[in-house]
Image: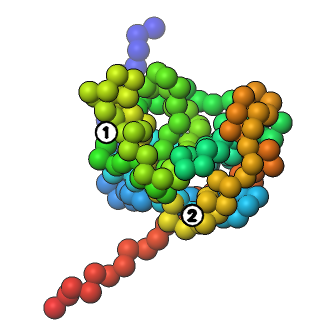
Amino acid sequence: MRPRRLGLPGAFAALLLGACVSACSLFAPAPEPTPRVLLQTSMGDIIVQLDREHAPRSVDNFLRYVRERHYDGSLIHRVVPGFVIQGGGYDVALQEKPAHAPIPLEAGNGLSNLRGTLGMARDEAPDSATAEFYINLADNLKLDPHPDIPGREHGYAVFGRVIDGMAVVDRIATIRTGALGPFEQDAPLNTVVIEHARLLPRVAAQPSGLGP
């Protein structure tokens, strides 16, 4: 049997559908450039603001895990005073949580590893970050890309910063650490849990006040 040709009514319907899709795309709200995420930990709340302009893939990746509730019930599993706290990859039983495929590295994006910034943890391979993230406790410029220093060519991608709750981060950094489970060192000996992570409502644009 020969395939049916698309007659005029079908063609008109397809054209109408295409126009609708185009119009819907045109008027769909743009992704929020600076989404905020609340991390409710067992030691207090931390609010981070993400930077989609400079690190779009890292931001979308982090938000994917937030929406999937991956971070709920995960550990802050690494604490190095004067350096970083790190979490998002292990559950309270010290088991590694399943993760999606790694994302491309976005280091060298104009954001530096300064105190209070949020970065993607990764393995030695540059494009190996999945769900784990860290918060800088100090200005860790050595984590930025240094093409002239062997072993530091690629750096670590910053994709946001703490805007509220840095005192909580600093309290976490005072916890006694040591060997625990799969970790040979730097693991908090008193459990610190990310109880919930959720995206906060979009902030309405404020009038500039520069009118006539």
Q: Point out the tag, 2 or 1, that comes first from the N-terminus.
A: 1
Q: Nearer the viewer, residue 143 or 132?
A: 143
What amino acid is labelled 1 in the image?
Answer: Gly
Residue sitting farthest toward the top: 1
Residue 73, placed above or below residue 122: below
Numbered disc in front, either 2 or 1: 2
Residue sitting farthest toward the left: 212
> Gap in Å between the C-alphas at discs 2 and 1?
24 Å
What amino acid is labelled 2 in the image?
Answer: Met
The image quarter containing residue 157 is top left
Secondary structure at badge 1 equals loop
**Residue located 41% across and 14% down the image:** 3
In the rendering, at what x and y percent does residue 25 appear? Answer: 36, 50
**Residue located 31% across and 27% down the image:** 149
**Residue located 49% across and 23% down the image:** 124
Q: Is residue 182 visible?
A: yes
In the rendering, at what x and y percent does residue 147 appear? Answer: 28, 28
Q: Which mark is residue 203?
A: none
Q: Where, quadrant-wise, is the C terminus in this rendering?
A: bottom left
The image quarter containing residue 80 is top right
Residue sitting farthest toward the right: 93
**Residue located 40% across and 10% down the image:** 2
Q: Where, quadrant-wise, is the N terminus in this rendering?
A: top left
In the rendering, at what x and y percent does residue 98 appear? Answer: 69, 30
Q: Which residue is mark 1?
A: 108
In the rendering, at what x and y percent does residue 178 appear? Answer: 75, 38
Secondary structure at badge 2 equals helix
Q: Which residue is mark 2?
A: 166
Q: Is residue 9 visible?
A: no
Residue count near mark 2 (Cα–Cα under 10 Å), binned few <14, some 14–19, many ≥20: some
